């Protein structure tokens, strides 16, 4: 198979809040529909969080996840990657519960703890739709996103039991060493699928220098060409990092979870619009996007039955 690029669409996440964009999907129906549309636009994989439909607050509620997962499975062949990162303040047990419940093909696996702060974003807004939003953002000033080795060992066992492949979220270079350690201890299976998360305040920033450093470190640890990787930059770095990653042999992730803008000053009206832009950029470089089945083959997932 000639090289194909997997586009992941990260549909809603737990970073942005309802005030920031009217297009951020909040209800399970809208999250599911935007995921289905993103897959139609060219995403092979959809990364899913749930929110409380009343006020858009990130939620670990399994019934909400069910109302998202079932319609996507019914209407689309896209690979579903459920979050186990959840949102600020959720316990590791709450975050991991989606794995045994839905046995998704992929689930995020956060490869270490970092400061994870959104507080500078709160300065940009003063008229909030919901009371929780400024408190959530401001409160993250004191936040550590906990992913201890004990947490990771438990989550790995849960994923193995469910037959779910972990997508290793790499927020900083040390997380690559954590992954190599877990593989060497037999606690994670190789070859890994890495997602370079660049631009979170508290972790590595979205520069080309840092992208090259992540890639070269992964090559040393896992062997050049012996693992799959994807990358994205938060906010305005989304398309530059995705484009660079694709040109360097990786895959990429776009979506309203990470970036609300299609262009400077222009809110993206949907996840599909962000995916369509990424497909156009790849096309300019004669890079083809992977279908879900091609992505399954690339990632070593079983064909969907
Ligand atoms: N929200 C991103 C910074 C997860 O869901 O487990 C990373 C992420 C992690 O998507
Ligand atoms: Zn996420």
Image (cartoon, rainbow, N blue to C red):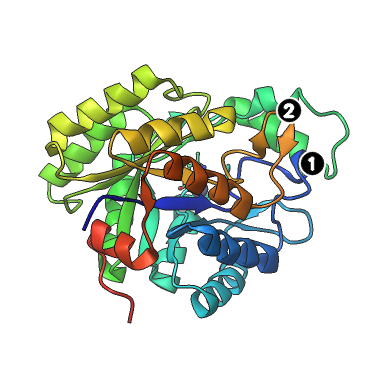
Which numbered circle lies on residue 122?
A: 2
Residue 300: x, y in percent?
22, 61
Q: How many marks?
A: 2
Q: At 16% from the left edge and 45% from the top edge, which residue is drawn? A: 183
Q: Nearer the viewer, residue 304 or 265?
A: 265
Residue 13 at x, y percent in the picture: 58, 48
Query: For residue 253, which numbered disc appears in the image?
Result: none
Q: CA distance from mark 1 to mark 2?
A: 10 Å
Callout 2 environment at 10 Å: few (<14), some (14 to 19), or many (20+)?
Answer: some
Looking at the picture, tell me which residue is in the foreground, 246 or 134: 246
The mark that comes first in sequence, 1 or 2, is 1
Point out the image quarter for the C terminus. Answer: bottom left
**Which residue is more in the foreground, 86 or 93?**
86
Disc nearest the viewer among 1 and 2: 1
Helix, strand or loop at disc 1? helix
| Residue 23 at least partly seen | yes
Identified at 47% across, 48% down, the residue is 85
Query: What residue is at 48 percent from the left and 29 percent from the top?
Result: 240
Picture layout, residue 287 above or below residue 41: above
Q: Which residue is mark 1?
A: 19
Residues at circles 1 and 2 in contact by the CB criterion of under 8 Å: no
């Amino acid at each position: 198979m000639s090289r194909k690029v997997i586009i992941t669409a990260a549909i809603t996440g737990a970073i942005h809040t309802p005030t920031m964009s009217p297009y951020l999907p909040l209800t399970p129906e809208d999250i599911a529909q935007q995921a289905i549309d993103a897959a139609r636009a060219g995403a092979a994989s959809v990364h899913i969080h749930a929110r409380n439909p009343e006020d858009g607050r990130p939620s670990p509620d399994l019934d909400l996840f069910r109302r998202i997962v079932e319609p996507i499975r019914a209407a689309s062949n896209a690979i579903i990657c459920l979050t186990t990162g959840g949102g600020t303040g959720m316990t590791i047990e709450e975050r991991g519960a989606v794995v045994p419940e839905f046995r998704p093909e992929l689930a995020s696996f956060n490869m270490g703890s970092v400061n994870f702060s959104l507080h500078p974003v709160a300065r940009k807004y003063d008229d909030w739709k919901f009371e929780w939003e400024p408190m959530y953002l401001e409160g993250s000033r004191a936040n550590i996103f906990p992913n201890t080795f004990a947490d990771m060992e438990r989550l790995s066992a849960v994923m193995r039991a469910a037959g779910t492949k972990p997508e290793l979220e790499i927020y900083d270079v040390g997380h690559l060493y954590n992954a190599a350690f877990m593989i060497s201890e037999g606690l994670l299976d190789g070859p890994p699928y890495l997602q370079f998360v660049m631009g979170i305040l508290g972790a590595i920033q979205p520069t080309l220098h840092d992208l090259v450093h992540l890639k070269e470190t992964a090559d040393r640890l896992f062997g050049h060409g012996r693992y799959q990787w994807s990358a994205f930059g938060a906010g305005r770095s989304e398309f530059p990092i995705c484009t660079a990653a694709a040109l360097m042999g990786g895959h990429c992730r776009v979506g309203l979870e990470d970036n609300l803008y299609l262009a400077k000053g222009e809110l993206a009206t949907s996840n599909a619009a962000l995916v369509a832009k990424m497909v156009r950029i790849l096309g300019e470089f004669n890079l083809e996007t992977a279908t879900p089945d091609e992505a399954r083959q690339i990632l070593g997932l079983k064909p969907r039955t």
